[in-house]
Image: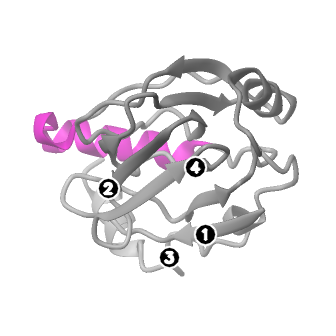
Amino acid sequence: MKTEAYSSRPEGRIPNSRFPLLVHRDAIPGGRVDVIKTRFRENGWSNNWEYPGIYRYAHFHSTSHECLGCAQGWIEFSLSVEGWTRVKLDIGDVIVMPAGVSHEMVDCSEDVLMVGGYPDGRDWDNIQEKFLTEEMFRQAAKRIMMLPIPTRDPVAGEALQQWLDAPSSVEGGWNDFRDGLDASS
């Protein structure tokens, strides 16, 4: 399994994350919904769903991190990492997405089928930057900062070392962002 990591910083009213977004290539060879769901659940990522793609509008979650596995076809995402990067997933690829990272489906095969999961079966919300007031943004950002790091990677089952090794908000240059949130409290 090859893993790609993408970094992000706050952008407008998209909080993004100090944790890198991870793309595990060929993580679950052959895909298959039941195999992906089983792997996610074995590693503590439940509240699973399957759907032909994801939303076609940019959105992020403030109540949970998310993993997305491609079970069939292919999908192309636009992600609020490294200046709105496009990433294509094929069968067996998995994204591990930190809360706060905006994402949307921009293209897909006609037969695409995605499987999602959330650490510890958390419930997720759906936030679109264009509908956020400043106060709603601050509340979402605070929820994100309070989320725990998941115990295990949804694919490998090991500690999410890239997240454990991520700089603190101060070391990573997030201090202005965090100070702005604290000042508004």
Q: Is residue 147 left or right of residue 63?
A: right
Amino acid residing under circle 1: Glu
Q: Nearer the viewer, mark 3 or mark 1?
A: 1
Q: Is residue 157 left or right of residue 103?
A: right
Q: CA distance from mark 1 to mark 4?
A: 9 Å
Q: CA distance from mark 3 to mark 4?
A: 26 Å
Looking at the image, tell me whether mark 2 or mark 4 is earlier in sequence order.
4
Q: Is residue 87 left or right of residue 118?
A: left
Q: Residue at x 48, y 45 (%)?
A: 99
According to the image, label 3 marks what residue?
170
- Crowding near the residue tagged with mark 4, few <14, some 14–19, many ≥20 C-alpha atoms within 10 Å: many
Residue in the foreground of this view, choosing between 26 and 109: 109
Query: Which residues make up the magenta segment?
Result: 128-147
Amino acid residing under circle 3: Val
Residue 82: give x, y in percent of width and height: 36, 73
Q: CA distance from mark 2 to mark 1?
A: 30 Å
Res 16 → quadrant = bottom left
- Crowding near the residue tagged with mark 2, few <14, some 14–19, many ≥20 C-alpha atoms within 10 Å: some
Looking at the image, tell me whether mark 1 or mark 4 is earlier in sequence order.
1
Residue 26: give x, y in percent of width and height: 71, 54
Looking at the image, tell me whether mark 2 or mark 3 is earlier in sequence order.
3
Do the residues bearing badges 3 and 1 touch, measured as CB atoms within 8 Å? no
In the displayed structure, 11 sits above or below 32; it is below
According to the image, label 4 marks what residue?
95
According to the image, label 2 marks what residue?
181
Do the residues bearing badges 2 and 1 touch, measured as CB atoms within 8 Å? no
Q: Is residue 5 magenta?
A: no
Q: Secondary structure at mark 3?
A: loop
Q: Is residue 130 magenta?
A: yes
Residue in the foreground of this view, choosing between 90 and 181: 90
According to the image, label 1 marks what residue?
4
